[in-house]
Every structure is written in structure tokens, then in C-alpha cells.
Amino acid sequence: MAEQYIYAVARVRGKELALLNGSFMETLMAAKDYDEALRLLSDRGWETDGASSPEALLKAEREKTWSFIEELVDDMSVFDVFLYANDYHNLKAAIKDAVTYNDHPEAYIDKEQCTMDPGPLKEALREHQFDLLPEDMREVAKEAMETQLHTGDGQMTDIIVDKAALTKIYEASKKTKNEILELYGELTVASADIKTAIRANRTGKDLPFLKKALADCDTLDIDRLANAATDSLDAIYEYLERTDYADAIPEIKKSPSSFERWCDNRVIDAMRPQIHNPFTIGPLAAYILARENEIKTVRIILSGKLNDLPEEQIRERVREMYV
């Protein structure tokens, strides 16, 4: 089994040489304007000429990543854990369109970035044919649809779907038995729970709401987190001091974006040992995450350039690079 990855990992090693490093990101941040930033990216092989917008540029880079990985492995389903969040994003969009009898195609993520085509998903929700959905999505789709129809509470609808998405990501990551994918699932759920707890405290949400919103994971006791969130922000921080996320507290206090950066950087730090492991799927998963991290950081910088944000404000959101 291990031998099947040796060639794939060798190919990935070659691609890693083209990844953008921290030094390049410093140069990109120092670009005088958006056009100069695009020229710098073009010099590093990014196809900027045909990109009509930053979104088109980043989408093209993401497609390059996935096309490359498809060349290396026969079964891409092991990487579905990276795509489930997009499926459930589309589920939320489909519910809202079905309830309002509208169609907002711009609200959906393209099928190339999902495990399921949003077209049939929209049709199933419009016709209330939940049996056409994947088995593990049927009940949550029905519950969320009924909640939206009977209460009009879009926030609760989102909470129901978001928790189901986190549960799906978590369970799928555990099934892979791969260190990087399991860590990705764990941090995805834990960071979402922490952000939910903080928002819930600031908006005065009660314990039943928190129990409905928080998803299980190994590194957090969600009952204790929920109880802390109904008390105070200090109670949340006091609880987190006794968890794996104690180092994140200063970043949480700064801003949500600082905490998101902390989570992304932690994944990057954990991925680096995969460089020395040529016998598992780990280096391929690490490459996908490295490219996503790279694309996210470029998005932050380009957005900053387009909106004339000061370099210091951009810098506080920039992620660590894999190389």
C-alpha cells in the first residue's frame, strides 16, 4: 500500500519548490499597488493575464491544485473532507432559495469545489425530495427546511446546517486514519466551536442555543464550553486555559481574524514533518492545505491592495507559509 504513494509524493516534492514562501509574501505585501502585486504573482507562474478578477485568479489556482492531485491518485474521495463545508454551504443556499421561491446562482459554490453538484441539490430542496440527497444529509436538510418555513429564523437554520457540516468533516477526517486529515478535522471543529461560544456570549444566547450549535470534538468539552459561554468571556478564557488552545487566547482577544490565522498556522506547523514521510497520503494532503493556505493569503493581500488598506492591517492577517 505504501509503495503506491512513492511516485505521487516525489511529484509533490517537485511542486513544493514552486510554493510561495514567507519572503515572497513580504515582497507581495510591499507592492505599491494591486497591479504590481499581480505582476509579482505572474513572475511566479500564476496565470494573471486571463483572470478578470481576483476571484477568477484564485479559482484558477485552486483548480490547478486539484487537477494536479487527480493525476496522482485513483481515488480522490480521501480528500472529500476538504470539500464538505462547500456542500453544506450550498445546502443553506438551496434551502433559502426553496423557501423564498427564488434562484440565486451566485450564492452557490461551483461543483468542482464540492462532492455533489449543486444543481440536483437545489432541485431536491425545491421539490422537498429529501430522499434524493446523500443519506447523512437528509435529516438535517429536512430539519433546517422546516425550521426556516415555520419560524423564518435564518440564524437557527444556519446553526443546524453548520453543525451538521462540522460533524461530517469531523467523522470523515477520523475515518481517514491520517494524522494531517485528522488534525484538520479537529481544528476545524474546535475553532468553529470557540468562535460560536464567543459570539453567543456577546449576543446573550442561552444554553439551549449553545447545545444546538456546538459540535463534538476530542480537544474540547462542549458542555463546559457552553456553560462558560453563558457566564462571561473571562469564563471562556479560563476554560480554554486548560485546553490545547491556551496559546490562542491572546489571538482570540485581538480579533476573530487573528484567531483564524492562529488555527491556520497551527495546521501549517503540524504539516511540515510530512516532508519526510513519502509512504502515506499525508504529503498530498499537506500540499493541498499548503496551496489553500497560499491562496487564502494571496486573497488577503490582493484585497488589501484593492481597498488601499495599510500594510500593518494586511500583515496581521497573513498566514505562515509551508515553505
Image (cartoon, grey):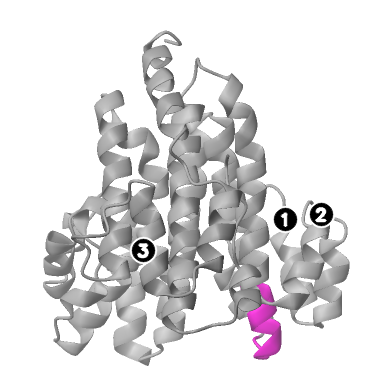
**Label 3, residues with CA under 10 Å away: few <14, some 14-19, many ≥20:** many
Q: Looking at the rendering, in which quadrant would you find the C terminus?
A: top right
Tag 1, which secondary structure? Answer: loop
Q: In the picture, residue 319 is in which quadrant?
A: bottom right
Q: Nearer the viewer, mark 1 or mark 3?
A: 3
Please tell me whether residue 194 is drawn above or below residue 312 in the rendered image: above
Q: Which residue is mark 1?
A: 220
**Residue 38 disc label:** 3
Please tell me whether residue 22 is drawn above or below residue 212 in the rendered image: above
Task: Please identify the dominant SS of the magenta region.
Answer: helix
Q: Nearer the viewer, mark 2 or mark 1?
A: 2
- Look at label 2 and name its amino acid: Thr
- Look at label 1 and name its amino acid: Leu
148 horizontally vs 195: left or right: left
242 horizontally vs 116: left or right: right
Q: In the picture, residue 29 is in which quadrant?
A: bottom right
Q: Marks 1/3: CA distance?
A: 41 Å
Horizontal and vertical percent position of residue 96: 26, 81
Q: Which residues are magenta?
A: 195-205
Q: Marks 3/2: CA distance?
A: 41 Å
Number of disc labels: 3
Is 204 covered by the magenta stretch? yes
Horizontal and vertical percent position of residue 47: 26, 53
